[in-house]
Amino acid sequence: NNRTALKQTAVDFETMEKKSSHGSNSNLQLLHEGEGLNYRMKTVPKVGGKKDISLWHDVTLVHVDPTTSRPTPYLNFVCEIPKFSRKKYEIATDEVGNPIKQDEKKGVLREFKKGDIFFNYGCLPRTWEDPTFVHPDAEGCRGDNDPVDVCEIGLKIVKPGDVRPVKILGILCMIDEGEADWKVVTIDAEDKWAPYLNDINDVEEQLPGTLDAIREWFRTYKIPDGKPPNVFGLDEKFMDKSYALEIIKECNHAWKELITGEKERKISSMGDDVQKLVRKLSKSNLLSLAPDDNEPPTF
């Protein structure tokens, strides 16, 4: 029930009680700046200042009820790409304030050549897939240096930059060009299907074919770019909610190490390519939090 779930959520994840943190979208608004390659979607408070809000760092992982200011059983999902669209929007993890931008390659804005994606796609705030860590189930691959990806399978089209409470249902381990790239399956807590979906088996029972379609999307979406199909760990199985929450907790811990600078101090023995990746993120993110936070953020 909800009371048990709320208690478990509070045990698993701490919520951050800082003025700079946002537990929901209730005080967030989007500003649109520039166009083309320079287009940025920035998040600022509706009230209480104009400082940029990082959707990666300043939004709590656990959803907080804006009316009671208490944690809920849900996690926050930051939408980057709405369902039924193809422009490849993403959080700019190496820019101060982490605005959303459209990805580009060699000066060309990127879209999914495969066509429109059929689920809302984004990430979990305050998570990081550590490129120095090899998960035992990830076929010997390191993390992809990004927040954990989310596939939200509800009926609503969620706009880029919106933050929604979601139920965690399961997870898929994709191997993308030699990197571990976990895909968390969720549903919006307010979706009409949400009461019927509590774990990954419920998705197959209530919405048969959905999981296979998600897997095939990720398997084939890079083929139109001339790349081979993606592969998957764990015998291509979607793992259950319990397994997914363990991965999320690991990635939340990795995020803490990144944002406090602890990870950078630990990687002197790593290859220079990995050190540069982590160093670039750490410098940007610490800078974006520096003005009004003397203490390292906790979660």
Image (tube, rainbow, N blue to C red):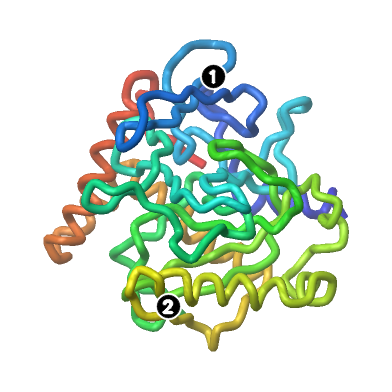
The residue most toward the bottom is: 235
Residue at 27% in and 53% down: 105
The spot of residue 259 in percent (x, y) is 35, 42
| CA distance separating discs 1 and 2 | 39 Å
Count of numbered marks: 2
- Observer-side mark, 1 or 2, equals 2
Task: Please tell me how crowded label 1 is: few (under 14), some (14-19), or many (20+) other residues with Cα within 10 Å.
Answer: some
Camera-nearest residue between 2 and 187: 187
Task: Please tell me how crowded label 2 is: few (under 14), some (14-19), or many (20+) other residues with Cα within 10 Å.
Answer: some
Q: Quadrant of residue 96?
A: top left
The spot of residue 155 in percent (x, y) is 76, 52
The disc, 1 or 2, on the residue closer to the chain's N-terminal end is 1
Residue at 28% in and 48% down: 108
CB contact under 8 Å: marks 1 and 2: no
Residue at 47% in and 69% down: 221
The residue most toward the top is: 48
Q: Which disc, if any, is residue 230? A: 2
Q: Secondary structure at mark 2?
A: loop
Query: Where 174 falls versus 234 (above or below)?
Result: above
Q: Which residue is mark 1?
A: 45
The spot of residue 62 in percent (x, y) is 63, 44
Q: Quadrant of residue 243?
A: bottom right
Q: Which disc, if any, is residue 62? A: none
Q: The N terminus lies in which quarter of the figure? A: bottom right
State left or right for residue 63 relative to residue 80. Answer: right
Q: Secondary structure at mark 1?
A: strand
Camera-nearest residue between 184 and 79: 79
Camera-nearest residue between 163 and 100: 100
User: Which residue type does callout 2 highlight?
Assistant: Asn
State left or right for residue 43 relative to residue 117. Answer: left
The residue most toward the left is: 272
User: Which residue type does callout 1 highlight?
Assistant: Pro
